[in-house]
Image: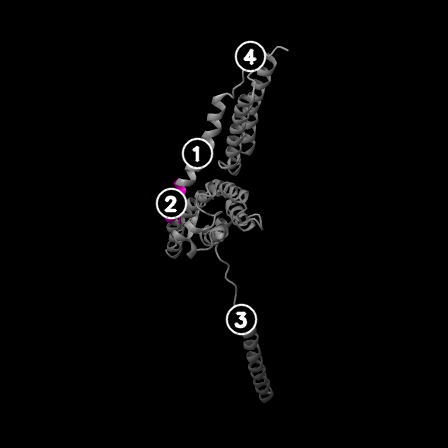
Amino acid sequence: MENGHKQLGKAAAVAHIAQLALFFALGAAMLGVGAPQQLGQARVANASFGILYALQATKLIMAHMSKEPYEVTAWPLVLLAVQPAWGLGWRVAMSGRGGLSSLKRLVKTFNSIEDYQEGEEWQEAIDALESVTSQVSGDPRGFDLTGDGERWEQAGGDEISEANEFPTVLYEKWVEVLTAAAEALEWEPAQWEGLWRNLQKWGRALQRVNLDFGSDTGMAELQDIIETYASGAPKQRKRKAPVEEAPAEAPAAEEEGEEEEEPEAKKAKGDDDDDDDEDA
């Protein structure tokens, strides 16, 4: 039987198995450590691994059929290693000083909303809410909302709420601010509609990692406020002059006046009748 240029023997077999094991280990790391599915890219990650595996398997089949030596292609291994390295590096960076500083800035921005409310600076309050919501929805894990909450406490976030409960507190703050600020803002309908689109986008991003941002009601409270003011109806009601109603006691007073006048009229009539009798 012709062996061709096949690599035979235990050493060659172990080398082949080690190469394939390295390939699968890097693939598992890409799907696990890098966690692209957490960013809504699970299909891309799985398809990428499938294509790279198909390249290796095709090469293995060709080497077997042509009786040539087999080695795993190197460049797919490099690609598989990049994603876990990036994922681990990102986690290390976020767990260091930079991540903690970002958390502290986020907590400070959220706390400043109370001051804006007291001063009725509604536009500034909404700007702060938009900044906080866009940040935490874009990277909930980076802001420790899905972790153990240790960095959240170090940044002072525990004075607001537990880490995983912060999106709920944030949603309630949105309802509170918009309820008080809606009439004062005098926004155009397009601005309200743009805000609603952003709130829906931020809510979906938080719900993907099982964080509650008005999930129970489907953000119905915010939707009611925004749809009402986007229609322009509140502004019309604001311009409409108030209707002054007559005091409820006025008719009763008039009736009493009429009752008082009646005896006097009867008395005057009686006096006239007496005068007529005397003349007669």
Extreme residue in the bottom direction? 278
Looking at the image, tell me whether mark 4 or mark 2 is earlier in sequence order: 4
Closer to the camera in the image, 105 or 235: 105
The amino acid type found where label 1 is placed reads Trp
Q: Give the residue pinned by disc 3.
A: 250
Mark 2 or 1: the one toward you:
1
State the SS at label 3.
helix
On screen, residue 134 above or below 269: above
- Secondary structure of the residue carrying numbered label 1: helix
Q: Which residue is identified by label 1?
A: 86
Question: From the viewer's perspective, is residue 197 above or below residue 117?
Answer: above
Marks 4 and 2, Cα distance to the nearest angstrom?
59 Å
Quarter of the image for residue 264 reads: bottom right
Ranked by sequence position, the earlier of labels 4 and 1 is 4
User: Which residue appears at 46% of the width and 29% of the height?
Assistant: 81
Determine whether, in the image, residue 260 is placed left or right of residue 98.
Answer: right
Closer to the eye: label 3 or 2: 2
Q: Are marks 2 and 1 in contact (CB under 8 Å)?
A: no
The magenta stretch spans which residues? 93-106
Distance Cα–Cα, label 3 vs label 4: 115 Å
Label 4: element kind: loop
Q: Quadrant of the C terminus?
A: bottom right
